[in-house]
Amino acid sequence: MTPIVDLAGKRGLVVGIANGHSIAAGCATAFRQAGAELALTYLNDKALPFIRPVADGLGTALLLPCDVRIPGQLEAVFDRIGQEWGRLDFLLHSIAFAPREDLHASVVDCSAEGFAMAMDVSCHSFIRMAKLAAPLMTEGGSLMTVSFYGADRVVENYNLMGPVKAALESSVRYMAADLAPRRIRAFAISAGAIRTRAASGIDRFDDLLDRVRARTPAGRLVGIEDVGRIAAFLASEAAAPMSGSVVHADNGAHTVA
């Protein structure tokens, strides 16, 4: 397959692969097809068997543990990248979490602790990563995160993740402004509804898929490979004028009332 962009010589970090069906896996595949060298993370030893085949298939240079809730683990990832590579060209953040009982509750009924955890893991971790990545992006770079249409509009059963993703998208705009003098750009990819392990935690997710498919102009859901091609473009210099943007990868679902 001919890549749509050339990332040869670029080095990137992908955080958030759960298995080969993850959005992050689709993005990592596109990065690799475009010629980039990759570092990947895995949540814990239990998750490693699901991620190892992806890493091996991509010829990943570095496979590192990273649970952003454990003090020091995120910093250790960037320390290792600094030691092994000395620089970083792009970063994909594709992690989100909320306690099940809070995710399944209405916004007004979710707990303060659950909301805070969802915001910390799903949003503030991207800000932390940007701070750690910036010193390694000596020639500029690209910071990307994954969002969803529920940041803009109320999506049934998306609940507290709507406000959390809205904060994530707002953070992208402020980060893009903060880091512009260093030629570091920031983007949010608003992916369409995709059947992933993370999405399975949303109540009645199959119904959501059916609704999204019905309202999408082409009547077709987006796939992880579609999102991956967008991410590969955003990792390239060609996307620099778009810094701070929320880029929709949903086959037009967000355009339909």
Image (cartoon, helix red, strand yellow):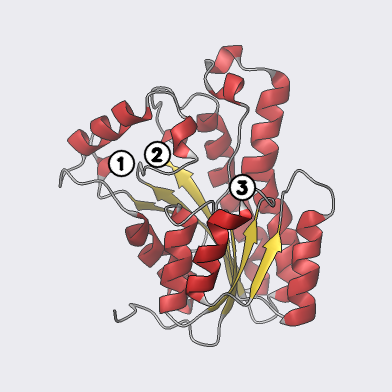
Instruction: State the separation of the CA atoms marked 2 and 3.
Output: 16 Å
For residue 13, say whether it is visible: yes
Residue 148 x, y percent position in the rendering: 43, 42
Q: Check disc 3 and report the residue beneath it.
A: 171
Task: Find residue 34 and report its image quarter.
Answer: bottom left
Instruction: State the separation of the CA atoms marked 1 and 2.
Output: 7 Å
Residue 179 x, y percent position in the rendering: 66, 64
Comparing 60 with 76, the one in front is 60
Q: Are the residues at dot 1 and dot 2 in contact (C-beta closer than 8 Å)?
A: yes
Disc assigned to residue 149: 2
Q: Amino acid at mark 3?
A: Ser
Residue 188 x, y percent position in the rendering: 49, 53
Helix, strand or loop at mark 2: helix
Helix, strand or loop at mark 3: helix
Q: Check disc 1 and report the residue beneath it.
A: 254
Instruction: In the displayed orientation, state which residue is furthest to the left.
Output: 218
Task: Find residue 117 and report its image quarter.
Answer: top right
Point 66% across, 73% down: residue = 62
In the image, is residue 129 above or below residue 105?
below
Q: Is residue 136 left or right of residue 59?
A: right
Q: Is residue 54 left or right of residue 67?
A: left
Instruction: In the displayed orientation, state which residue is furthest to the top.
Output: 109
